[in-house]
Amino acid sequence: MKKKSVKNDNSTVNSLLVRRPIQRWFPLFILPTFLCFIIGFIWPFAQGIYLSFCTFNTPKDATWVGVQNYVKAVTDPGFTNAFWNTAKFAVVSIILINVLAFSIAYALTQKMRGANLFRTVFFMPNLIGGVVLGYIWSMIFDAILKQYNTYLTANAKYGFWGLVILVAWQQIGYMMIIYIAGLQAVPGDMLEAAKIDGANGWQTLFRVIIPNVMPSITICTFLTLTNSFKLFDQNMALTGGAPEIMAQGAKIKMTELLALNIYSTYNINKNWHGVAQAKAVVFFILVAVLAIAQQAATRSKEVQQ
Amino acid sequence: MKKVFALLLTLAMVLSLAACGAKEETPAEKPAETPAASSDAGSVYYLNFKPEADQAWQDLAKTYTEQTGVEVKVVTAASGEYETNLTAEMAKSEAPTLFQCGNAQSLMTWGDYCLDLTGTDVLAEMTTSDFNLTEDGAVKAIGYCYEAFGIIVNKALLAEAGYELSDITDFASLKAVAEDIHARSAELGFDAFSSSGLDGSSSWRFSGHLANMPLYYEFRDDGVTAQPAEITGAYLNNYRAIWDLYINNSSAEKTSLTTATGDMSSGEFKEKKAVFYQNGTWEYAGLVEAGIASEDLAMIPIYCGVDGESEAGLACGTENCWAVNSQASEADIQATLDFMKWVVTSDEGTQMMAEQFGPIPFKNAKESANVFFNDANAYMADGKYTVTWAFNHTPNVDSWRSTVVSALATYSADQSDANWDGVVTAFVDGWAYEYNMQNG
């Protein structure tokens, strides 16, 4: 069926008759979304920052206490420990996930039988929720470690590397998809030119392919960085921070990452709500700074095609 | 015209959003009706704590009103919302006359509202004062039901191994029996203790209930009645002794305890693979359902080698305590006290209490089918001392327990003195730390 009377091309949209009211009334059109954004994001965010300077049980009964919460937050050995755990975890998992995801993507973009099947299979772990994965992997690790007469939460090292394996297993498939898209966009004539010029496989990889997939690398490192900093449910379900020890007159959960630390601080009792809030603000600044720095660093290496 | 229309639309949008945001919070449960202001007779307003017993209370209130003409209003707070509801209701002019004040924390908040029940008829009906909350000699709240925990015994298996319940009277005899059964486990086909799992579904039995033993004896010696800032751990060697007994005389591997669940432990007991199983009165229905004959079941105290413990009863405690609102009018207070007395003495009342709450610590209590309660009552009747729930004082309880569990797991994998020091640190230093955290 053809519509005859309606001209459906750019000239209609661009006509002055249509454009002028849009230009005049655009605040009205963005208003619903903008209001939602304020209610759902800006306002809670501002309130969160305000609450980090307060003691409170519910947001309604907040009383201002100044920077006291921040002092408590940064002097908490559990928080420091969680920070270093997170930093180590981020470094290890960024390298591991990206190298493996890139390698698999590279392998699966070569002409091989069943590449599509492999892509699907590698992507599948990403479809399972973090809590479920945490519990399943804790069983797997415990079953393995049982052979060596020990258990997952016996040693902080087991918990740490267990978490690395879990997260790598979960995220490699996702990053792989991004890398595959990047690899497929590498212009064929460039590869051909490299071949004609006599470049070997490694030279082609490092001089042609990697510079061309730099946008994918930027995205993937950004995602793995923020993912590993924000990691929460896998951490909670796998070890829950155990083993816990008393040291320096304080309790330290050996395998706790930042997000879980904030969560458990909040749940101590109402005296700690403000401190957890302060930790969350510190955490936000940390993630924001790291992500911006990382973006700037990798962006500069991207090439225009 | 268009402008006006657009403005109207905008307004509608904004208003609908605002309407979403400004929705008034309604209290969880509103009393269906306010009772007619009764004049001289007074009336009762009970703010009930247990949602599952709501219907039973409503029916009982109706019966009482039919019999005596005294108005009884029962309102039930939603689960976990009791404190909030109580705060809201107490602020009203028609405040509850009977409410729940179950632990030291609650007493701190509501102590001023609790009538001293000394000399009241309902108090005179009680068989024990162990579950009551007192403050400066005044009885502020009375425990109207309780739970008990100890070591559940399969008497049939015990007999098969050549022992009977009366052979176990203290730690030494328990140890002798358990070690003998463990040594002959291959030939007998069952072991002494069910697995002492330290998985989250099971660890509370040891970081909570078993840990109550050293805490109880320490607090008894030191006369501690309120939450202490620090503990000494004077009885931790007893804790170690009983823990060693549990894990050394069980079929479970010591290194896999962190993953052993509560279901595994109860499963071993239900499948008649273990004679002893540490748990509480609430397990009764499940065990009978699993096919263990009720007459084969018994509960004995957790013996851990403290002097004079052959005089110990089961560890009984409760958070279900009644308090009468002292701020209510004279007539209402009298009506409430009469109602309470009727509940624990009348046929209808005791019947309902036995069904809903098990045996109640009152003279006219109806028998319960639960043998564990009957055991608990028998120990009390024999004049043995009740081990009270000292763990109710634990600061920041979940966090404290998880540290103890971590240390206990390390110790279980390798029962060295150094690892036990870790448990002691988690127990004693952990307590001080959590106390500071809680109050910091």
Image (tube, grey):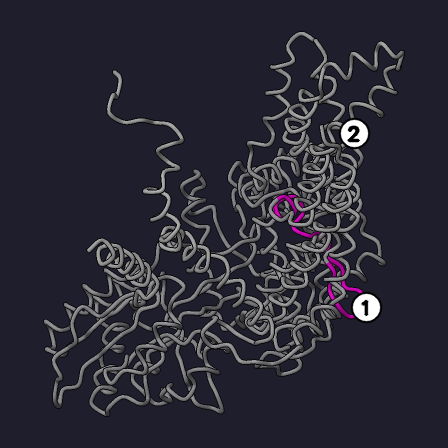
Q: Residue at x 55, y 31 (%)?
A: A127
B101 on left or right of A124: left
Left or right, residue B383 beside residue A227: left
Q: Which quarter of the rendering shows the N terminus of chain A?
A: top left
In the image, A48 versus A73, the foreground residue is A48
User: Which of the chains bears the disc numbered 1?
Assistant: A
- On the image, the x and y values in percent for residue A61 come to 47, 77
Q: Assess disc 1: are there few (<14), some (14-19) or many (≥20) residues with their C-alpha within 10 Å of its C-alpha.
A: few
Where does the image place residue B274, in percent across and percent down from the top left? 59, 41
Q: Is residue A134 above or below residue B320?
A: above
Q: Which mark is residue A211?
A: 2
Q: Compared to A264, does A117 lie above or below?
A: above
Residue B394 in sight here: no
Secondary structure category for the residue under label 1:
loop
Residue B141 appears in which quarter of the rendering? Answer: bottom left
Q: Quadrant of residue B20?
A: bottom left
**What residue is shown at x 56% (from left), y 38% (from top)?**
A132
- Which region shows up in magenta? A234-252
* Mark 1 or mark 2: whose residue is earlier in sequence: 2
> Real-space Cα distance between discs 1 and 2?
49 Å
A246 is within the stretch colored magenta: yes
Label 2: chain letter: A
Tag 1: amino acid: Gln
Q: Nearer the viewer, residue A241 or A180?
A: A180
Secondary structure of residue under mark 2: helix
Pointer 1 residue: A248
Q: In this view of the protein, can residue A129 be seen by the observer?
A: yes
Relative to B157, residue B409 above or below: below
Q: Which residue lies at the image location 77% right of the left edge and 58% below the top edge?
A: A81
Position of residue B235 measured from the top left corner of the image (x, y, whole percent) = 71, 69
